[in-house]
Each structure stands twice: as C-alpha cells, then as structure tokens.
Image (cartoon, rainbow, N blue to C red):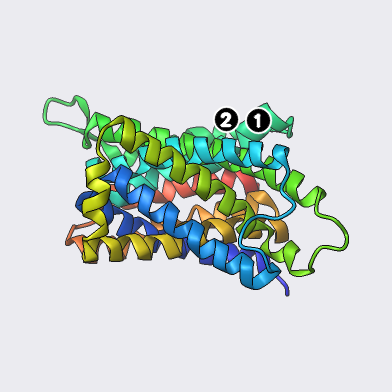
Amino acid sequence: MQHLGEIISLIVAMSWTVTALFADKASHRLGSTTANVLRLVMAAIFLAVILWVGVGSPYPVYADGKAWFWLAASAVVGYVFGDWCLFNCYLSIGARFGQLFMTLAPPIAAIAGWAILGESLSWKAGLAMAVTLSGIAISILSRGKDHQVRLTLPLKGVLLGLGAGLGQGVGLVLSKVGMEHYEAIIPPDAPEQMGTLLPFASTMIRAVIGGAGFLLMLALQKKTQELKAAVHDRTGLGYALIMTVFGPVLGVSLSLMAVQYTSAGIASTLMALTPVFILIPYAVFFHQRIKLRELIGVTVSMAGVALFFLF
C-alpha cells in the first residue's frame, strides 16, 4: 500500500493525543508513578494476548540476550526516565505544554543516532534544533511590564519537559538498535506473522522492563499503598486503560512499525504532530483558552522538526 508508513505515522500522532489527554487525568488522580505501573502492566497483558493469537506464544520468542539488553536499555531511558519526566510534567504544566516539549524528541533522536550509531548529521541539525527551541521559547516566555523576559510556566515543569524530550529521543534510537538485532536473528522458519508483530514483541520487552522499573521506584519511595488504592479506583483505572490502549499498545507499537515502511525522518516528523492535534481537544477537555503566542510557538516548533528531516 502506497504511503503506508506515513498513514501509520499520522495514526500514531492521533493515538498519542488521546494518550496525553488521559495520562494527564490519570496522573492527577492516581499519581504519575502509579499511573505508569498500571499502564505498563496492562500493556504487557494486551501485548501477550496479541502475540499469543498472532504467533502462538504469549512472550517475545526468538529474542536473545542482546535484543533484550538494547530494548531494556531503551525502556529505562524512554519509559522510566522519559515517561517519569513526562507524567510529572503533566502534573506541573499540563499535557498541552508537555507535548510541546516532545517536539524535541525527533532532533534529539537524530543527534543520538549520530552519536550512538554513527549516522550522518548535516549542518541543518543545529539550525533545526534552534528553530524548535525558538518555538518552545515563544510559547513559554513572555515580556513583563518591566520589559524583563520571564517564564510563563513553572521552572520545574520546563525542566521535566526537557527531560521527557531527551528520554523519548534517546530511547527511540536504543529501541531501533534492539529491533534491528531482534529482526536479524528471527529464523527463516518462523511464523510469517512474526515480521509484522515484531514491533509488538519489542514493545512487550520494553513494557515489562519499564513496568518493573516504575514498580521498583514505588517500592523505594514506600508508596506501594498508592498502587493498592488505585486498583479499586474505577475511574482512575478507566483513564489508565484508555492511555494504555492508545499509548504502549497501539501508539508505541505502530511507531516502531512506521519506521519499517517509511524513512525515520518522515515518520518522526508526522508523529511529532501531536502538539498540534492536542490543542483543540485539550481546550475543550480542560476549558482552557489557547493564546495566539502558544499557537505560533507550536507552529514554529513543528517547522523545526520538519526542517530537521525533510529539507
């Protein structure tokens, strides 16, 4: 099918929009770490069912130690660090601004690909990063009556947003390494569906490691009681279920599938449209007015992402 990768990438952006909206709600109701434990445990269960139906095994078959290592590393960086920053960012500044910082993920992924994989990186990288950062700055900075430039958002939320973009970008590169190795070791006599379901198997490994990481975090913080309370919170579980289906199960798995059918640059650019898609539903859900400055900032940030990959 022509442009399949591009279509999948747009579906991913819309899927992550739904995820962000309900992750915001779940983080406020359940706590960020508890919400992450629930969504990753649910994700692992959903993915196990998908693999069982598709290839007859409820776990990632054929994955060796090296595949587990790289995918586990991507889970620690992308889920445990990146999503911890992102969900706490939602608590501080909301999903709309949190997703704006995620426009940093594609250029950071390209830089990480250059540093880790030796991929080529042109002079446009620096320019694109500058444009993306300029868009974010337009959205979060303002000039007061004394002509001093000030943050319109809490510094904590901004730092968490930067951490989320960093974790997402580096985590994507590490997952690419793991997936490429995983794909290379699949035997010729493996079920034909294994090729299609490879992203789901890879995501299951990341979900298991990420869930364990967040569970350990809860234990170290002595907040396991929050998890017990969350299990009995039907509304909170509903939020967690929705963000699980549209996040780790569909969104992440389809994002890995997208790069199989189109270039990583085009896929990353289209998937980074979430900050645009989220503007109207966020305004409706949370009854917040969108300022012209913020709209301009999102547009400039998206231009930076497009510049990085498409020109």
Q: Nearer the viewer, residue 165 or 67?
A: 67
Say if 42 sits above or below 115 in the image: below
Badge 1 amino acid:
Trp
Q: Quadrant of the N terminus?
A: bottom right
Above or below residue 4? Residue 173 is: above
| Residue matched to label 1 | 123
Could you say which quadrant of the image residue 146 lies in? Answer: top left
- Viewed as shown, does residue 119 lie left or right of 231? right
The image shows residue 57 at horizontal and vertical percentages of: 66, 64
Q: Secondary structure at mark 2?
A: helix
Please provide percent x and percent y for residue 219: 32, 35
| Amino acid type, mark 2 | Gly
Q: Whole-percent x and y of residue 302?
A: 47, 49
Q: Is residue 107 left or right of residue 42?
A: right
Tag on residue 126?
A: 2
Task: Tell me the quarter of the picture where residue 25 sits.
Answer: bottom left
Circle on res. 262: none
Q: Residues within 10 Å of mark 2 (few under 14, many from 20)?
A: some
Between the residue at mark 1 and the residue at mark 2, the CA separation in whole angstroms equals 6 Å
Is 138 left or right of 304, judged from the image as shown? left
Would residue 51 appear left or right of 119 to someone viewing this image? left
Residue name at image x 45 percent, y 42 percent: 212
- Residue situated in front as seen by the camera: 115 or 137: 115
Tally of numbered tags: 2
- Asked whether 73 or 92 is in front, the reply is 73
* Residue at 19% from the left image edge and 57% from the top image edge: 289
> Which residue corresponds to the image point at 37% horizontal and 48% vertical from the top-left?
36
Residue 137 appears in the rendering: no
Crowd class of label 1 (few under 14; some 14 to 19; many from 20; radius 10 Å): few
Asked if residue 69 can be seen in this view, the reply is yes
Asked whether disc 1 touches disc 2, contact meaning CB atoms under 8 Å apart, the reply is yes
Q: Secondary structure at mark 1?
A: loop
